[in-house]
Image: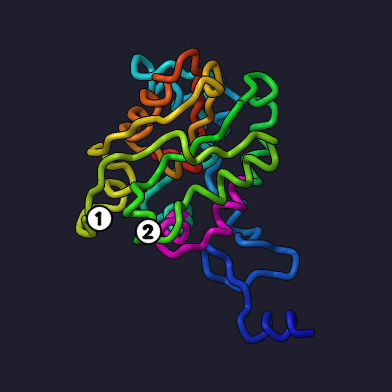
Amino acid sequence: MLKDLLNLLFPKVCMACRDVLLANENTICASCRHELPLTNHVETASNELKQKFYGRLSLEHASALLYFHKKGLVQELIHQLKYKNKQEIGHFLGEWYAFDLKSIHEQHHFDAIIPVPLHRKRKIERGYNQLTTFGQALSKSLEVPLCENILHRDSYAVTQTKKSFLDRIDSSKTIFDVEFTAEDHHKHFLLIDDVMTTGATLEKCGKALLKIPGAKLSIVCMAYTH
């Protein structure tokens, strides 16, 4: 009764278009879900995202769920997740993509999921890492542990609000390092991020993880800038 009253007074809305969700809809309405531009990267081993890292990183697998277009539905979702603390979006996308990634996991066997980290000061300011719920959903579905204490961001920059959205989500002026033990040797790390633009941040993260003896690396993103 109370839940029905709350839904009446404060109806749940689609995180993409802001229309009221129907009773059987969750986070994103059916109409928007059908409009979201899927990459189908998992169907092609040598897809465009993986090719982007050719000569830069040695990858076992690389893919993104969606294409990112300026002023599109995906930009709205990422903005709501990253700056408005709508963590249910990360969970929704993680559950969705995990279904496609199960066959990739069976083929390559991921040992740990590693989110691109925020600097500790930025995380305190924001209160969360926008990748946490995405990683948790992947972790639960794939039965692979989410590890947030191996990769660290050692540089901090004040957000420049006058930069374009794409510039802000993929700044290359960052330094990453790893803390690991012998138990982390020879593991296959699945590095996750929200949006890949130039790939500079993921490249630095990947090179840091590959310092671990015997490490293998794969990359998965919510979206890829097309």
Q: Residue at x 32, y 54 (%)?
A: 121
Q: Which residue is mark 2?
A: 124
Give 216 or 103, whichever is nearer the viewer: 216
* SS of the residue under disc 2: helix
Lateral position of residue 128 relative to residue 147, left or right = left
**What residue would you read off at disc 1?**
159
Q: Amino acid at mark 1?
A: Thr
Residue, far right: 1
Q: Is residue 80 magenta?
A: yes
In the rendered structure, the answer to whether residue 33 lies left or right of residue 115 reads right
Q: Secondary structure at mark 1?
A: loop
Identify the residue at the far front of this view. Answer: 181
Please count the marks in the image. Answer: 2
Residue type (three-letter) at the residue carrying disc 2: Ile
Residue 128 percent location from the top left of the image = 45, 57
Distance, label 1 to label 2, CA atoms, is 14 Å
Q: Which mark lies nearer to you, 1 or 2?
A: 2
Q: Residue at x 58, y 39 (%)?
A: 146
Q: Position of residue 108 (x, y in %)?
A: 62, 19
Residue at the image position 66 percent from the left and 58 percent from the top:
30
Badge 2 density bin: few <14, some 14–19, many ≥20, Cα 10 Å: few
Q: Main secondary structure of the magenta part?
A: helix
Label at residue 94: none
* Residue 187: percent from left, percent from top: 56, 21
Q: Quadrant of the N terminus?
A: bottom right
Segment colored magenta: 78-94
